[in-house]
Amino acid sequence: MKKIIYFSLIGIFMFLSSCSEDDIVPAIDTTPEYAELLKANAAKSDADAKIYEWYQKYGTAFLYDFRDVDFSWQWAGKFKNAYIKFDTANKEDMEALANLLSLIEKNFLSLYDEDFLKSNLPYKVFLVKVLRNTSNVKSTLSSSWVSALGNDQDAFMIGYQQKNGRVFSNSTYETELGNVFGSFFYDNLPVKPEKFVNSRVECKFSLVTIPVDNSITAEFANKPDWADKNHQANVCGYIKGYTMTKVKVPTPAQDYTDYLTFITKNPGSYIRKYTQFYWRIAKRATLFIEFFQKANNQDLIGVQNAMFPDDKVSMEDFAYTE
């Protein structure tokens, strides 16, 4: 997404040059100025050190001390959701910020490949104490407090507290932040992996434990000789189930990144363990590899082989019988 946005900016800047001075508003920051700012702040606290580390890894600025105009801007209009920033002079708020970073790392960043995040994260991620999905700051509806939102352009917003000051759960961050990320990169893919998506097993209530096809349920009884916390998800052809209980069906975006990581970031012996026991994983991996070759002219088998020269995988390892 970052590469795509760079080229899109050319057209946007041409459009802005035709606007009156009153129409001009803050723009997406594509300069490296955050590098110096975050580097200078890195020694202030463990939280700032972590933020600078993430900037170096992903090229994304995680911001908690920012101008309101930066937060509210988006190309399509104004982002008017109510929010409360962390008070940088308040010790408890700074401890909460550090905890929020840990939650983000555990329930979001660690679930994706580093190179994938570097290519697909937005330029900015705003971290706030409270985030609402409405402009009504006085709303008492529990649903008005949210853990993550996107501004449909170049930024995510991540909130820490919900109603009554409670912290959002691990599973909430995993699901909601994952969904925001998915809508940012997956919905904008130039070409969708249609055959791969169409091979998804439909499940009631989005739970891998309740496939619509009852015959699949019978396959749950046949378990591998290793402890597999994702057994039911694997039977359904998903690399893993989501939430703490591993039973939530992944979103198409999560499914996409799960397979990309599974194929390219694991030794052949690990991949074979799953493709030889779970035929749907072998089938869907084959569809994914074929899609990637056609859409991106990239050989994922070659990528895996280069990363694990002593434990390669081949297309024969994805052979399957339904």
Image (spheres, helix red, strand yellow):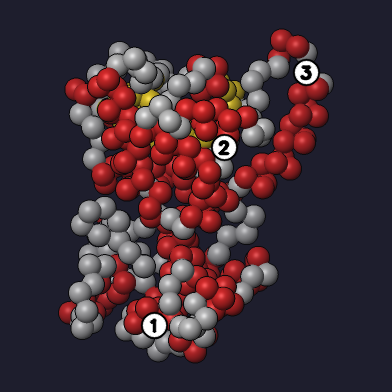
Rendered view: 305 above or below 148 = below
Residue shown at the point (46%, 83%) measured from the top left: 311
Whether residue 116 can be seen here: yes
**Mark 3 and mark 2: Cα distance apart in space:** 25 Å
Whether residue 183 can be seen here: no
Q: Secondary structure at mark 1?
A: helix
Q: List the residue tagged with mark 2.
A: 123
Q: Nearer the viewer, mark 3 or mark 2?
A: 2
Instruction: Name the residue type under label 3.
Output: Cys
Instruction: Name the residue type under label 1.
Output: Ser
Q: Is disc 1 in contact with disc 2, using a CB cutoff of under 8 Å?
A: no
Image quarter of the C terminus: bottom left
Residue shown at the point (55%, 65%) measured from the top left: 194
Residue shown at the point (52%, 55%) measured from the top left: 116
**Mark 1 and mark 3: Cα distance apart in space:** 59 Å
Q: Quadrant of residue 76?
A: top right
Give the crowd class for mark 2: few <14, some 14-19, many >=20 residues within 10 Å. Answer: many
Q: Is residue 187 left or right of residue 175?
A: right
The earlier-in-sequence mark between 1 and 2 is: 2
Q: List the residue tagged with mark 1.
A: 269
Residue shown at the point (46%, 65%) measured from the top left: 261
Q: List the residue tagged with mark 3.
A: 19
The earlier-in-sequence mark between 1 and 3 is: 3
x and y percentages locating residue 142 in the rendered image: 24, 27
